[in-house]
Amino acid sequence: MPHARYRRIFRNAGMVAAPAATSEVEWLMSGDICDRSLVLRAQSGESNAFDALVRKYRHRVMKLVMRYTRNYADAEDAVQETFIKAYFALPNFSR
């Protein structure tokens, strides 16, 4: 599962704590919290907020990448790289 792969990479780099309770992640992904709030929380170090962003947008990014690669394994790798780059770019992100 790609989600587990990205989490393992971040955890090995010491950037992600243990997974949050499912209900907390579902709450973060709900319509009650906007993307801007999630980004701000992720910038302040809340790994659960970044996790929610990944869960929210992974499917959309995967669909887009599949249009170009037409290969699931390559698309999975590209999506993982995309979110890794997004994670490292968080400190410089402003809206």
Image (tube, rainbow, N blue to C red):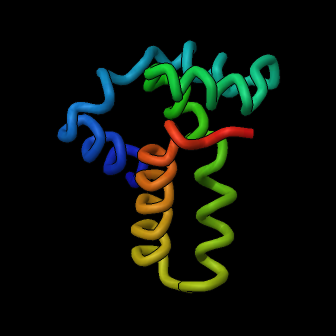
Which quadrant holds residue 49? top right
What percent of the width, then of the height, locates residue 28?
64, 21
Q: Is residue 21 left or right of residue 5?
A: right
What percent of the width, then of the height, locates residue 57?
65, 48
Position of residue 95 relative to residue 71, above or below, is above
Depth order, front residue of 40/61: 40
Residue found at the very far left of the displayed protein = 12
Query: Which quarter of the rendering shows the C terminus?
Result: top right
At 67% from the left edge and 27% from the top edge, which residue is drawn? 29
What percent of the width, then of the height, locates residue 14?
22, 32
Position of residue 59 relative to residue 38, above or below, is below
Q: How many marks?
A: 0
At 45% from the left edge and 15% from the top edge, which residue is drawn? 21
Position of residue 3 relative to residue 39, above or below, is below
Which quadrant holds residue 35? top right
At 62% from the left edge and 25% from the top edge, which residue is drawn? 40
At 21% from the left edge and 40% from the top edge, which residue is drawn? 13
Q: Is residue 92 left or right of residue 16?
A: right
Depth order, front residue of 39/22: 39
Q: Is residue 22 left or right of residue 67?
A: left
What percent of the width, then of the height, locates residue 88?
42, 46
